[in-house]
Amino acid sequence: MIRLAWPMVVIQLLQVAYNLADTFWLGRLSGNAVAAISLAFPLVFFLISVGGGFTTAGSILVAQYTGADSETSAGKVAAQTMGFVVSIATVLGVVGHFLTRDMLALLPADAETAAVVVPMAADYMEVFFLGMPALFGFFVFSSLMRGYGNTRTPMLVMFVSVAINVALDPFLIFGWWVFPELGIAGAAVATIFARLVAAAMGAYVLFFTSAGPSVSLAQFVPDLSMVSKIVRVGTPSAAEQSTVALAMITLTGMVASFAPAVVGAYGLGNRLISLVFLPAMGLGRATNTMVGQNLGAQQVERAEQAVRLAAKSAAGVLLVIAVVAAVFPRPIVAVFLSPGTENAAAIVDYGSTYVRIRSVEFVFIGVLQVLLGAFRGAGNTKTAMAISMVTLWLGRVPTVYFFAFVLGWGATGIWVGMAFGNITGAIVAAAWFTRGTWKRSLVDSDAEAA
């Protein structure tokens, strides 16, 4: 489990490095630029989530076919998933590019936010959407390799991609050397180029090496039965991720009704808290692979043992992180804002309170991510979807509205309400896990391997 998990923790850390590098340099540009990417991210994530569920399906099926010792089927699943997901990404990228300003217009923004922050968010999003095929190319490569049991290769590819993004950010944002000064759009261009390099490296690994499932061009010819299976397994995950994105958009709409400093603190706080998800998501995805391969090999007890071990490990690690976040939130937040930029002091004040309050839920985040990984690895994507919907639409969105607007707590109400979601979800997921109904494989190891 550790062998599988630590590269995925590093991959998630590198993903956060992408986001934090953008936040760091845009924070030097202006506080409003930080607020702009806070508005942009939920809308971008919504379109990403539509195709993201099908990358999850590829990971699940590759893991179970690999566990059932069916290499040919694993390779075919990989090829069919790649072709299907990249096609979806192309369509979503075009749609997102042309509908960016219409989507942003739906947010009930404060007057100052609408005048200054929203146009900057649109500049970022319109460029970002053009790079969706490259973005999904790396996502599907990483997911397929995870299902195969190789998490180190995607980690190395991700490292190269992040290094390119971090190096390009200041040159494109501020116009250093021979590069044009693109402002917030420069952060999007840097990300797109870095993801394109990662997607090309991933394609090379799958086609020309033995590090992952064996893929050939002939396997890309659409197979309706395989695509149907990918859609059947992936649709609940796509729906799950879409409901997550819709909840984020709803929350962003609530936050946008406050001043830009609150919007900036919300976005910056979320990016910092995404660091907390690193060990949780690493262990959750390792659990996904271990449950999938063990159920494919009919090793049910070993699959359950992996889940329990991962949950205990995640809870222990995140308890330590929670204590650090509760004690030192202000210096952590202040690193990402230059004192001279507008709203910097207010963003640090709001962001420090946000991080301290949300530290209460960190242990629950770990348990929830591991259990969701177990359900997905077993192919119970509908269960994972239902629990995610409970987490967000019962545990988070209504509580944010209640505390912030009904009780009139303002920004503090947002921070308190946000902490309720993962606590609720972890309790529900643990109760469902004890029922044991998730222990079922999607493949027949004898018939399908033959």
Image (cartoon, rainbow, N blue to C red):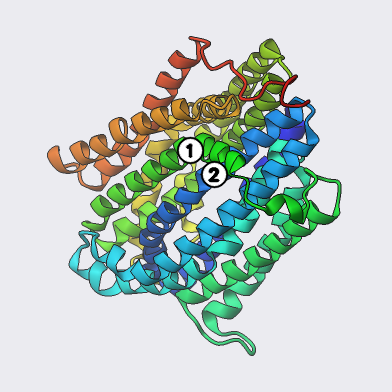
Camera-side residue of 169 and 354: 169
Residue matched to label 2 = 54
Instruction: Write the residue at 55% across / 29% down.
Output: 376
Visible in this render: residue 16?
no
Camera-side residue of 421 and 247: 247
Instruction: Write the residue at 50% across / 15% down.
Output: 433
Residue matched to label 1 = 237
Relative to 430, residue 368 above or below: below
Quadrant of the image for the N terminus?
A: top right
Q: Secondary structure at mark 2?
A: helix
Relative to 10, residue 364 above or below: above
Residue 132 falls left or right of residue 413: right
Across the whole image, how many numbered discs are drawn on residues? Answer: 2
Instruction: Write the residue at 29% across / 47% down.
Output: 251
| x and y, in percent, of residue 412 in the image | 27, 43
Type of amino acid under label 1: Ser
Residue 393 falls left or right of residue 335: left
Q: CA distance from mark 1 to mark 2?
A: 7 Å
| x and y, in percent, of residue 430 in the image | 47, 17
Residue 274 falls left or right of residue 316: left
Q: Secondary structure at mark 1?
A: helix
**Marks 1,2: beta carbons within 8 A:** yes
Q: Earlier in the sequence, mark 1 or mark 2?
A: 2
Type of amino acid under label 2: Phe
Camera-side residue of 289 and 422: 289
Tell me the quarter of the picture where residue 78 sits.
Answer: top right
Instruction: Write the residue at 77% across / 43% down.
Output: 213
| x and y, in percent, of residue 392 in the image | 34, 36
Mark number for residue 347? none
Quadrant of the image for the C terminus?
A: top right
